[in-house]
Image: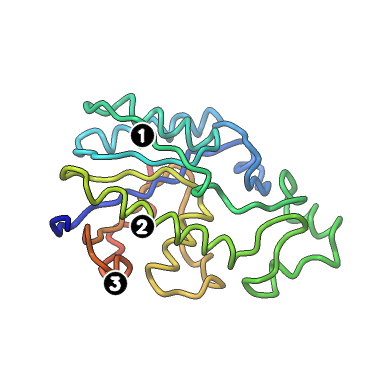
Amino acid sequence: MSELMVRRLWLVRHGATVWNQEQRFCGQTDIGLSSQGEAQAQWLGEQLHTRSIAALYASDLLRAQQTAAMITQQSPQSLSIKSSSAWREISFGAWEGLTYAQIAARFPDQLAFFTGGVDAAPPDGESPAAFAQRVLMAFVQLTHDVSSLAAGDIVLVSHGGALRALLCIVLHMPLEYQWQLHIEPGSLSALDFVNGSEDVLATTTLTLLNYHA
């Protein structure tokens, strides 16, 4: 059995994209960082430069990969990016690339996602309930994977929706209240958890939320 220790997990929301700035639903559409997003990723690397990092995980989507790469470039340690589709944003299906006004105009009879609780999905998309289950499984797997690593922080570069879902799980908040958790593009949040615990959720605490430039 691994030795129990408190681990710091840095939750990094990728830098901004043009679609973020235009308030479009991006979901799993694979677009890259804007110039603002690149500057934010540079800032994130500067903030994490002095931390001893044992592992870096990231969504496999381009905007997260670009952000993770800028963090690794500024790290004094040699870090590889452990990429996974499990950390992708929620799929908005047919709504991706649209603003809310466009969605409401084109899909007036299919808006239960916004009002109908956690089981309603966008057309050809993912329900919040299924999304949260995916995030929970990814988090538990991550904590298992790092239990054998040497001491050091863990960095996770993901998306606003995925990080809000994870925080709802950790804080025992209903998913319907996720919008109370503000996580800006290019921001840092942090969780501490007991490495090797049989019930990692019972040992996980939120220690920083939405720190950004």
Relative to 150, is 119 above or below? Answer: below
Q: Secondary structure at mark 2?
A: strand
Q: Which residue is mark 1?
A: 43
Please give left or right for residue 161 compared with residue 122 in the image: left
**Residue 202, numbered label:** 3
Please give left or right for residue 13 compared with residue 131 in the image: left
Q: From mark 3 to mark 1, how far is it between C-alphas?
A: 32 Å
Q: What's under tag 1, amino acid-wise?
A: Trp
Q: Please give the name of the residue rendered at 45% of the width and 59% of the height, measured from the top-left corner.
A: 137
Q: Secondary structure at mark 3?
A: helix
Relative to 132, is 18 above or below? Answer: above
Q: Please give the name of the residue rendered at 70% of the width and 73% of the height, measured from the top-left corner.
A: 115
The N terminus - image quarter = bottom left
Cβ–Cβ below 8 Å for labels 3 and 1? no
Q: Nearer the viewer, mark 3 or mark 2?
A: 3
Q: What's under tag 3, amino acid-wise?
A: Ala
Point out the tag, 3 or 1, that comes first from the N-terminus.
1
Cβ–Cβ below 8 Å for labels 1 and 2? no
Point out the tag, 1 or 2, that comes first from the N-terminus.
1
Please give left or right for residue 20 compared with residue 140 in the image: right
| Quadrant of the image occupied by residue 106 | bottom right
Chosen colour scheme = rainbow
Q: What's under tag 2, amino acid-wise?
A: Leu
Give neighbour class at mark 1: few <14, some 14-19, many 20+ (Cα, 10 Å): many
Q: Which residue is mark 2?
A: 209
Give neighbour class at mark 3: few <14, some 14-19, many 20+ (Cα, 10 Å): few
